[in-house]
Image (cartoon, helix red, strand yellow):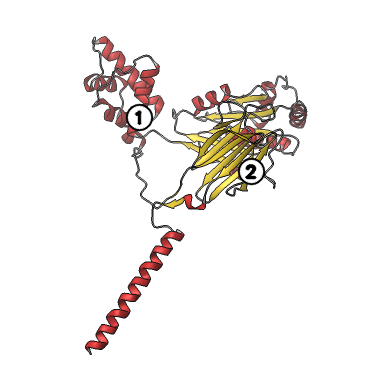
C-alpha cells in the first residue's frame, strides 16, 4: 500500500472475507501517512457516478452539490494540479465494503466504478499524480482491471495463526503470559469461526463473558459450547460451504538466495552494513527503513533493493534527489556484484556472489547439471566396461 504513494499511477485492489481486517488495514495505513498526502475516503458507493464525484470533492473541502458532471471533473482536475504544484500527493480510498446492495439499486456499484474511472482519467497525466486504493469485497472489476497495478487478497487465518492471534490479542489487553483459553478450545474456535478475525473476536469475547459469569479463571470447552449455543452458530464450513484453510507445506523445488549485504559508506568510510535476502530492502531517511541514512539529502523512502528468484534489482522510489548507479535505476535495473549506488556523499556497495544462488530441489541449476553430467560419464564408463567384459566372455 505504501507503493501507491511512491509510484505515480494505477489502482491497488484489496479484497477479503467480511471481517478479515480490510478496514483495520486501511486505518493503520492512514495513521502512518506523511503530512504531504491529501486523503479522500469514500465509504458509501450505493450512489450515482455524479454523487460519487461530488463525494470526492466534499472530502477535499468543496461544496459541489450544484455542479454538473463536466464541472465536477474540471474541479477535480484543477484540485489535483494545485496539490501537485504544492508538492502534495493525493490518495483516494474507495471502501465498497460488504453491505448488501439495496433493492432497486442494481447496477449502481458498476456505475460508481465508471465514475471512479472518470476521476482517475482526469488525473491520468504525468504532472497530475493521483493514487487510488480500491478496497473491495468482490474481485469483479472488469472495467478497472487494465489499470490495476497491484492486487492483494486478505485470506482467513489458519488454525495455528488463529491460536496465535487470540494469544496476541490477550497479551495486548493485559493478560500477560496467562493462558486464559484452555488448549482444547482453540480447534473448536477455529471450526466455528473459520479463522475470520471478526468472528474470532466475537466468539472469544462471548466465551470470556460466560466464564466471568461462572466465576471461572479460564475458558474451557464447556464455556465455549455455551457461547456457541448463545450465538446460535453452526460450524463455519457448514454455513459458508467453504473449506477451512489448512497449513500447506510447500515441497516444490524452490530457488533460495543466501543473504548478501549492502555496505554503507560516508566519504569513503564504512558506517553500516545491511544483510539482504529474498524480498526487498528499503533504503531511506527514517527509522522504519531496513537501511537508514540520516541525511537531508535522502528521502523518507529513497530506494529499494529487491531480491527474487530471477535476480536482484535496484530501484529509485521517486526520491527527491534520485540515485546514481552509473546507469538509470528507474525503472528497476538488474544489480551486479560490486555495484556502487551513490546518494549524495553516501555510497552503498552491493555484494552478492553468483554462487549464493542455491537450489532446494531438482531445478535447472548449473551445479546440478555438472553433477548429472558427471554421473552420466560414470554410467557411460560402466557401460563400456560391461560391453568389453561381455566381448571377452564371448
Q: From where the camera sits, is residue 139 visible?
A: no
Q: From where the camera sits, is residue 238 visible?
A: yes
Where in the figure is residue 6, as x and y percent of width and height? 64, 34
| Side (left or right) of 391 relative to 41 | left
Where in the figure is residue 13, as x and y percent of width and height? 55, 37
State the separation of the CA atoms marked 2 and 1. Answer: 44 Å
Circle on res. 162: 1
Circle on res. 315: none
Give the camera-side residue of 277 and 152: 277
Please report the residue visible at 30 percent of the width from the left and 29 percent of the height from the top: 234
Please report the residue visible at 53 percent of the width from the left and 40 percent of the height from the top: 261
Residue 85 occupies which quadrant of the picture? top right
| Side (left or right) of 388 relative to 141 | left
Check the picture and name the quadrant holding the N terminus: top right
Please report the residue visible at 57 percent of the width from the left and 35 percent of the height from the top: 282
How packed is label 2: few (under 14 Cα within 10 Å), some, or many (20 or more)?
some
Residue 50 occupies which quadrant of the picture? top right
| Side (left or right) of 159 relative to 37 | left
What kind of element bears circle 2? strand
Dot 2 or dot 1: first in sequence order is 1
Residue position marked by numbered label 2 in the rendering: 340
Q: Residue furthest front?
A: 269
Discs 2/1, front: 2
Check the picture and name the quadrant holding the C terminus: bottom left
| Side (left or right) of 256 relative to 384 | right
Amino acid at each position: 500500500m505504501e507503493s501507491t504513494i511512491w509510484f505515480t499511477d494505477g489502482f491497488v485492489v484489496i479484497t477479503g472475507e467480511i471481517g478479515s481486517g480490510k478496514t483495520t488495514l486501511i486505518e493503520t495505513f492512514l495513521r502512518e501517512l506523511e503530512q504531504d498526502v491529501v486523503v479522500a475516503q469514500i465509504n458509501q458507493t450505493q450512489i450515482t457516478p455524479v454523487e460519487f464525484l461530488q463525494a470526492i470533492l466534499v472530502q477535499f473541502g468543496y461544496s459541489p452539490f450544484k455542479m454538473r458532471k463536466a464541472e465536477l471533473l474540471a474541479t477535480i482536475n484543477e484540485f489535483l494540479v494545485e496539490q501537485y504544484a504544492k508538492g502534495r500527493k493525493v490518495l483516494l480510498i474507495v471502501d465498497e465494503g460488504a453491505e448488501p446492495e439495496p433493492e432497486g439499486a442494481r447496477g449502481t456499484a458498476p456505475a460508481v466504478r465508471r465514475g471512479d474511472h472518470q476521476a482517475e482519467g482526469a488525473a491520468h497525466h504525468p504532472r497530475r499524480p493521483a493514487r487510488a486504493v480500491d478496497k473491495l469485497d468482490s474481485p469483479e472489476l472488469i472495467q478497472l482491471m487494465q489499470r490495476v497495478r497491484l492486487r492483494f487478497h486478505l485470506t482467513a487465518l489458519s488454525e495455528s495463526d488463529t491460536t496465535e492471534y487470540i494469544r496476541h490479542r490477550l497479551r495486548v489487553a493485559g493478560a500477560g503470559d496467562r493462558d486464559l483459553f484452555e488448549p482444547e478450545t482453540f480447534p473448536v474456535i477455529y471450526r466455528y469461526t473459520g479463522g475470520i478475525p471478526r468472528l474470532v473476536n466475537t466468539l472469544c469475547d462471548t466465551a470470556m463473558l460466560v466464564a466471568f459469569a461462572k466465576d471461572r479463571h479460564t475458558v474451557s470447552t464447556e464455556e465455549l459450547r455455551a457461547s456457541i449455543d448463545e450465538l446460535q452458530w453452526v460450524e463455519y464450513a457448514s454455513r459458508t460451504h467453504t473449506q477451512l484453510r489448512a497449513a500447506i507445506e510447500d515441497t516444490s523445488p524452490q530457488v533460495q538466495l543466501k543473504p548478501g549485504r549492502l555496505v554503507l559508506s560516508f566519504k569513503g568510510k564504512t558506517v553500516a552494513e545491511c544483510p539482504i535476502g529474498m524480498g526487498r530492502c528499503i533504503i531511506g531517511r527514517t527509522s522504519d527503513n531496513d537501511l537508514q541514512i540520516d541525511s537531508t539529502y535522502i528521502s523518507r523512502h529513497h530506494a529499494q533493493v529487491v531480491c527474487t528468484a530471477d535476480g536482484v534489482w535496484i530501484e529509485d522510489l521517486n526520491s527527491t534527489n534520485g540515485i546514481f548507479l552509473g546507469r538509470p535505476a528507474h525503472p528497476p535495473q538488474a544489480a551486479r556484484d560490486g555495484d556502487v549506488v551513490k546518494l549524495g556523499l553516501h555510497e552503498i556497495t552491493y555484494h552478492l556472489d553468483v554462487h549464493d544462488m542455491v537450489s532446494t530441489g531438482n531445478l535447472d541449476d548449473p551445479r546440478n547439471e555438472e553433477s548429472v553430467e558427471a554421473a552420466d560419464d560414470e554410467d557411460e564408463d560402466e557401460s563400456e566396461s560391461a560391453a568389453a567384459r561381455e566381448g571377452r566372455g564371448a
